[in-house]
């Protein structure tokens, strides 16, 4: 998982505030992004798809999804950072 870009992060955080950890549809998320941020449908779909690929949105099946909480996301990023950092320190030793 990588850090999102500014636009992706703003969309992720908005969707989390709006939907929380509840299940929702991908179409509903895309429509919320389109309506709130004034993106066209293609851009809104692309941003939601990127958030799914990055792991910020979890697909439950083909049409349903859940937004991961910021705590959940940051905990995973912290774990990955610590693993990478320990590898770097070992290589220097």
Image (cartoon, helix red, strand yellow):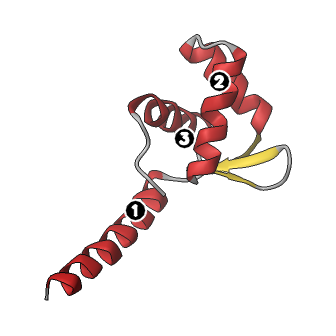
User: How much space separates mark 2 and mark 1, taking CA atoms?
Assistant: 25 Å
Q: Position of residue 54 (x, y in %)?
A: 56, 50
Residue 66 shown left or right of residue 25 in the figure: left
Q: Is residue 88 above or below residue 47?
A: below
Q: Position of residue 74 (x, y in %)?
A: 39, 59
Residue at the disc numbered 2: 44
**Label 2 vs 1, first from the N-terminus:** 2
**Crowd class of label 1 (few under 14; some 14 to 19; many from 20; radius 10 Å):** some
Who's the residue at 38% across and 72% down the image? Answer: 79
Q: Position of residue 85 (x, y in %)?
A: 25, 73
Residue at the disc numbered 3: 16
User: How much space separates mark 3 and mark 1, taking CA atoms?
Assistant: 17 Å
**Crowd class of label 2 (few under 14; some 14 to 19; many from 20; radius 10 Å):** many
User: How much space separates mark 2 and mark 3, taking CA atoms?
Assistant: 16 Å
Q: Quadrant of residue 84?
A: bottom left
Q: Quadrant of the C terminus?
A: bottom left
Residue at the disc numbered 1: 77
Tally the marks.
3
Q: Quadrant of residue 7?
A: top left
């Amino acid at each position: 998982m990588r850090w999102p870009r500014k636009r992706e992060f703003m969309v992720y955080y908005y969707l989390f505030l709006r939907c929380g950890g509840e299940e929702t549809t991908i179409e509903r998320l895309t429509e919320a992004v389109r309506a709130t941020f004034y993106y066209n449908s293609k851009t809104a779909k692309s941003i939601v798809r990127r958030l799914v690929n990055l792991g910020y949105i979890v697909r439950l099946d083909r049409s349903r999804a859940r937004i991961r909480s910021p705590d959940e996301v940051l905990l995973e990023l912290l774990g990955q950072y610590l693993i990478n950092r320990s590898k770097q320190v070992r290589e220097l030793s």
